[in-house]
Amino acid sequence: MLQPETSKSTESNDAGVSGKDTEQTRWLSMYEQMLKIRIFEEHVNQLYTTAKMPGLAHLYIGEEAIAVGVCSALRRDDYITSTHRGHGHCLAKGASVDRMFAELLGKEAGYCRGKGGSMHIADQDTGNLGANAIVGGSAGIATGAAMSSKMRGSDQVTVCFFGDGALGQGMLYEVMNMASLWKLPVIYVCENNQYNEYTHNSETTAGEMSARGKAFGIPTEEVNGQDIRAVYDTALRMVERARRGEGPSFILCDTYRYHGHHVGDIQRSYYRSKEEEEHWKTERDPLKLFASWLVEQGMADSQTFEQIEQQVRVEVEAGEQFALNAPYPDASEVEQDVYA
């Protein structure tokens, strides 16, 4: 069970202050969302390695604070676009674990009726315009959605998630240029997990990553992607700025994926050291850091974390079982949903 790295239990403060109650509820909800993503992905890993899941799986474990921190600053009708490593984004924006599992397993009950799979989940009801298997491929979709908001006179904001590998894609810079010129309400969130597939980004990305946004006159901030409070605070300010019509922003989040590029990538020792992995998992784990802070603030103790984990595990296990028992799409539909 995930616990803060301290055995000290702190009693909650007086619950009579409504502001404190609201803050505590918000932070604990965000912790629960992060834990849900972590446990969901652990189950995905098990499903894949036991040959129950087709296709590929790119796990989000280690990066949970970014998805939850950013999406917690959004409204339900705001938009996001995601990546091949997008399970965390989908869940943080409001997707249910049962339909997520169903989609991953190719079942009809999935968000795309089992026809999109791990890298193409979309859910219009929660403003999720879709994950994308093409590196940087959703940048145009996100910027287009932001342009739509502006043309309709809506104050909806769009967040475009992408990895550091997308910084080598020309489309990203074309749309960032457009977004800056037209002051579109879009936030570009770069999840810098240090590696472009199997190569450290120091070998693939020249100059400063944060300079990409600044070159287009886009306000840019670099944050510790393992600190959900820093991510949330930055995202909240950028979202409010976009709603005021002040244009795009760029958030560079330093983070780390605990597993390989995809589940089948079992040779991580060839391109990164065990010492490096251990450092991130023990010293910079987003759940441990957040849990320790919650204890320090008197907002949680070991019993609180046990209750949250129990609830999350019940939900995830029920969702997985639902998906395993769900039917596949009928074979007669093989040519449906192929073309718009």
Image (cartoon, rainbow, N blue to C red):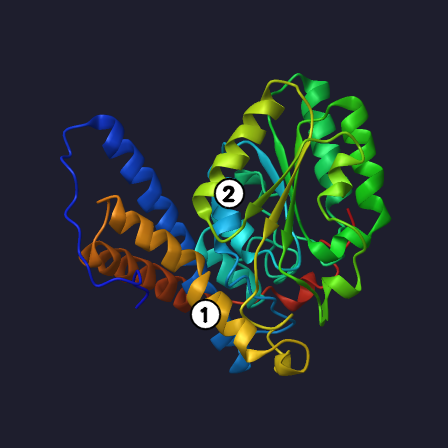
- Lateral position of residue 244 relative to residue 287, left or right: right
The local crowd at label 2, few if under 14, some if 14 to 19, many if 20 or more residues have their Cα within 10 Å, is many
Residue at horizontal 30%, vertical 68%? 1
Q: How many marks?
A: 2
- Lateral position of residue 277 relative to residue 297, left or right: right
Residue 260 in sight here: yes
Q: Position of residue 332 (x, y in %)?
A: 68, 65
Residue at horizontal 33%, vertical 58%? 312
The local crowd at label 1, few if under 14, some if 14 to 19, many if 20 or more residues have their Cα within 10 Å, is some
Q: Amino acid at mark 1?
A: Glu
**Front disc: 1 or 2:** 2
Mark 2 falls on what kind of element?
A: helix
- Lateral position of residue 77 relative to residue 228, left or right: right
Q: Which mark is residue 117?
A: none
Residue 76 vs residue 335, the one in the foreground? 76
Mark 1 falls on what kind of element?
A: helix
Q: Identify residue for label 2.
A: 231
Q: Position of residue 337 (x, y in %)?
A: 71, 53
Residue at horizontal 65%, vertical 72%? 55
Residue 96 vs residue 290, the one in the foreground? 290
Residue 74 in sight here: no
> How far separated are the C-alphas under marks 1 and 2?
23 Å
Q: Determine whether label 1 and label 2 are within 8 Å by CB.
A: no
Q: Position of residue 297 (x, y in %)?
A: 26, 43
Measured along the vertical axis of the image, is residue 176 above or below residue 67? above
Q: Identify residue for label 1.
A: 42
Measured along the vertical axis of the image, is residue 282 above or below residue 288? below
Q: Amino acid at mark 2?
A: Val
- Lateral position of residue 112 relative to residue 134, left or right: left
Measured along the vertical axis of the image, is residue 143 above or below residue 320? above
Indicate which disc, 1 or 2, sits on the residue closer to the N terminus.
Answer: 1
Q: Position of residue 195 (x, y in %)?
A: 68, 65
